[in-house]
Every structure is written in C-alpha cells, then in structure tokens.
Image (cartoon, rainbow, N blue to C red):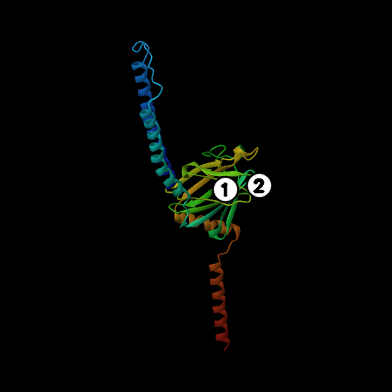
C-alpha cells in the first residue's frame, strides 16, 4: 500500500478475512457437533420435527446483522475513495491502442506518450512487459485528481499499490484520485480487455520528492519549448522598463 486508499482497502480486507475465518470455524464446529450428536447410532429413532421457528429466526437475523455491520466500514471506504475534493494538482490520462498518453494541465500542458519497451530495448533492472519508455512522474504527499478517458476503445487505468482502477471510456471523462505517501516506483497495467495488445499497456509511476518533481517538470517544459506565462509577463515588464529608460536617456 502506497496511498491512504490502499491502506484502508487492506484494513477492510483483513476485517473480512477475519470474519470469514470465524464464520467458517463456527460452521465447521456446528457440523461436527451435529454429525457426532445426531448420528444413527445415538439416535436410532429419527426426529419427527419439521422445523424450529426460533432457530430459523436466529440463523436469519444474525447474518443480517453481520452484513449490516460490514456495510458501515464498506460504505465509508467507498465514499472516501470517491472523494477527490481539494486536489493539489490534476493529471489527465488517455488510453490508446496500445499505449498511454499523460498530460499535466497545471504545469503548462506538459504531455507525452508512454509505450512498453520491447525486449531488445530493455536495460539491466528493467522488468519485462512492465518497463516503459516514458514514466509517469508525480510528487509525494500530494493529492492528485486523475481524469481518465479513452480515445478508441475501453481501457482501464489501474495501479494496485495506489488502490485505483478506473475505466477509460471514449466520450466519457471518469475521475479518481490518489495521494502517494512513499517515494519509489510503482507498476500497473490496463485492466480492461482492449484488443490484441491489451497485455502490452503497462503503467510505471515514479513517486519523487516535490523538489525533484519541479525539476522534472522544468526539464520537460524545456524539451517541449513551453514558456511560462509568468515569465512572458516578466519579459514584457522588463522590455517596457528598458524602453522607458531609453526614452529618459533620449530626453
């Protein structure tokens, strides 16, 4: 788990596992008791009882109470997973056959495609069928809204360690969010059958410090020739100042 959502999903899984284990043990003990207590040897004359109203009420009411008890943390987790307010940055993800396109709208529109590396391009330490040419980079401890859509067919953007999985549907914009709490590299894949190249759409996310993210964004802007609006305004002001100074000298 590398996000609060996945941590809560793990906790929910552990609760369900404990309850399933306890119920299974109870049912096993009950069956063994019935087998030994009510077998033919100890009960040569079969019981004439057709039903037991009190027992039926008990074994109907208890499962209902268990399900209601489970629904409370389940619904809380569901609403927490869907709550993407107060996001600190936005990331746009578009699924194509068979690669991903990423865009950073808050960072001057930095965007790039991410393809899976072929076997001949793999380097030492790369994971086959998971390594990509351009990794998705995000800052740690930052709440990120993810807008997901598809360009051709239905894909699914899924990163298990982040606890997110959202369909990328053409003509529709789906939302999810995550807040990575650990620096490192995390992997995901397309999780919706999207054609012959479905198994070759890996996702690689590098979670870095906020300072390293700013440096990475700056390098990407430089590669793409993107100029900040604030820089343009500063240049205009400096040009205006130079013009006014020249006019003063002329006078």
Question: Residue at left 57%, top 85%?
Answer: 247
Q: Identify the image quadrant of residue 58.
A: top left
**Alpha-carbon distance for marks 2 and 1?**
21 Å
Q: Quadrant of the C terminus?
A: bottom right
> What label sits on residue 171 in the rendered view?
none
* In this rendering, the label closer to the viewer, 2 or 1: 2
The residue beneath circle 2 is 152
Q: Residue at x 50, y 53 (%)?
A: 145
Is residue 75 or residue 174 the one in the foreground? 75
Q: Position of residue 129 (x, y in %)?
A: 57, 37
Q: Secondary structure at mark 2?
A: loop
| Relative image position of residue 46 (x, y in whole percent) | 38, 14
Depth check: give the residue in front, 193 or 35: 35
Is residue 15 among the parts visible in the rendering? no
| Residue 88 left/right relative to 153 | left
Dot 2: few (<14), some (14–19), or many (≥20) neighbours within 10 Å?
A: some
**Quarter of the rendering containing residue 157:** top right
Looking at the image, the residue that sits furthest to the bottom is: 251
Q: Position of residue 225 (x, y in %)?
A: 60, 60
Question: Would you say 100 lies left or right of 81 here?
Answer: right
Compared to residue 43, the image places residue 87 above or below, namely below
Q: Is residue 206 visible?
A: yes
The relative height of residue 178 versus residue 18 in the rendered view (above or below) is: below
Residue behind mark 1? 134
Q: Provide residue 23's location: percent of width, then percent of height.
A: 38, 30
Q: How would you rate the neighbour count of disc 1 (Cα within 10 Å): few for under 14, some for 14-19, many for 20 or more? A: some
Secondary structure of the residue carrying numbered label 1: loop
């Amino acid at each position: 788990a590398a996000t609060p959502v996945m941590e809560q999903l793990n906790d929910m899984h552990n609760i369900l596992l404990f309850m399933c284990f306890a119920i299974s043990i109870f049912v096993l003990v009950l069956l063994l008791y019935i087998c030994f207590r009510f077998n033919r040897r100890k009960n040569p004359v079969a019981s004439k009882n057709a039903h037991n109203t009190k027992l039926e009420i008990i074994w109907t009411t208890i499962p209902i109470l268990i399900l209601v008890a489970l629904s409370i943390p389940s619904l809380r987790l569901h609403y927490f997973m869907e709550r993407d307010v107060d996001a600190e940055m936005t990331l746009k993800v578009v699924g194509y056959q068979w690669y991903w396109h990423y865009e950073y709208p808050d960072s001057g529109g930095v965007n790039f495609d991410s393809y899976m590396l072929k076997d001949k391009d793999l380097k030492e330490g790369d994971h086959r069928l998971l390594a990509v040419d351009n990794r998705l980079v995000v800052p740690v401890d930052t709440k990120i809204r993810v807008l997901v859509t598809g360009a051709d067919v239905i894909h699914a953007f899924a990163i298990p360690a982040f606890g997110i999985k959202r369909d990328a549907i053409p003509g529709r914009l789906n939302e999810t969010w995550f807040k990575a709490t650990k620096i490192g590299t995390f992997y995901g894949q397309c999780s919706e059958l999207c054609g012959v190249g479905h198994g070759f759409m890996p996702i690689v996310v590098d979670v870095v410090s906020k300072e390293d993210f700013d440096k990475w964004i700056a390098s990407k802007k430089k590669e793409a020739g993107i100029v900040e609006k604030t820089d343009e305004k500063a240049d205009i002001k400096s040009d205006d100042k130079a013009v006014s100074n020249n006019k003063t000298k002329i006078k």
